[in-house]
């Protein structure tokens, strides 16, 4: 039988801080664009009205895109389900006999002008299959230490 051993739900789901911020900025920019389109400018400022509305439109477009893609990322975060013979990740199902390697990867984001200064570090659990397909689980989204320890036990069986 292929019974469920453990289920690891994503840490961040639903309305995140980034999605709320981008959503509010999008709404404010759209309202400013509507109000700015109805206002009659003074004669000296008539040339700036269209430029200002265009700037608001592009800002709303960029912010709306950021809101949508942040939402899309949270929708794609599915639980990691570990069973006796295989496991489900957001990237598909992998059988324990097909795992070639599982390791931690430290992603370091450096400064733009000071390449030696590390701004942010994120740790990933990378699960490589024999057919060279990889499953990358971030510490920002999952409890990768618990997943890795349970994965080691299952692979050794």
Image (tube, helix red, strand yellow):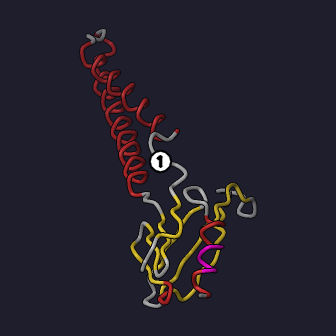
Stretch in magenta: 149-153
Say above or below: 156 vs 140.
below
Say above or below: 151 vs 70.
below
Q: Residue 77 vs residue 145: left or right?
A: left
Say above or below: 131 vs 127.
below
Residue at the image position 45 percent from the left and 73 percent from the top = 3
SS of the residue at dot 1?
Answer: loop
Q: Is residue 126 magenta?
A: no
Q: Quadrant of residue 92?
A: bottom left
Q: Quadrant of the C terminus?
A: bottom right
The answer to whether any part of residue 48 appears in the image is no
Residue at the image position 58 percent from the left and 81 percent from the top = 154
Residues 131 and 35: in front is: 131
Residues 126 and 98: in front is: 98
Q: Position of residue 20 (x, y in %)?
A: 46, 35
Q: Quadrant of the N terminus?
A: bottom left
Task: State the residue lying farthest toward the front.
Answer: 1
Q: Residue 124 vs residue 73: left or right?
A: right
Q: Residue 116 vs residue 112: left or right?
A: right
Label 1 crowding class (10 Å Cα cut-off): few <14, some 14-19, many 20+? some
Residues 49 and 129: in front is: 129
Residue at the image position 48 percent from the left and 74 percent from the top = 83
For label 1, the residue is: 13
Q: Residue 91 vs residue 57: left or right?
A: right
Helix, strand or loop for the magenta stretch, by majority: helix
Q: Position of residue 93 (x, y in %)?
A: 40, 76
Q: Quadrant of residue 126?
A: bottom right
Q: Position of residue 23 (x, y in %)?
A: 41, 34
Task: State the residue lying farthest toward the right.
Answer: 116
Q: Position of residue 76 (x, y in %)?
A: 39, 57
Residue at the image position 44 percent from the left and 57 percent from the top = 77
């Amino acid at each position: 039988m292929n019974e469920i051993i453990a289920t690891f739900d994503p840490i961040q789901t639903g309305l995140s801080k980034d999605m709320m911020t981008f959503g509010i900025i999008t709404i404010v920019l759209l309202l400013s664009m509507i109000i700015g389109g109805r206002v009659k400018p003074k004669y000296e400022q008539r040339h700036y009205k269209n430029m200002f509305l265009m700037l608001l439109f592009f800002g709303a477009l960029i912010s709306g895109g950021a809101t949508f893609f942040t939402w899309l990322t949270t929708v794609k975060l599915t639980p990691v389900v570990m069973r006796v013979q295989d496991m489900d990740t957001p990237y598909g199902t992998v059988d324990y006999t097909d795992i070639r390697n599982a390791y931690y990867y430290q992603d370091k984001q450096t400064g733009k002008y000071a390449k030696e200064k590390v701004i942010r570090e994120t740790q990933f659990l990378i699960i490589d299959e024999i057919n060279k397909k990889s499953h990358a689980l971030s510490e920002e989204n999952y409890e990768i230490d618990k997943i890795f320890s349970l994965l080691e036990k299952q692979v050794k069986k």
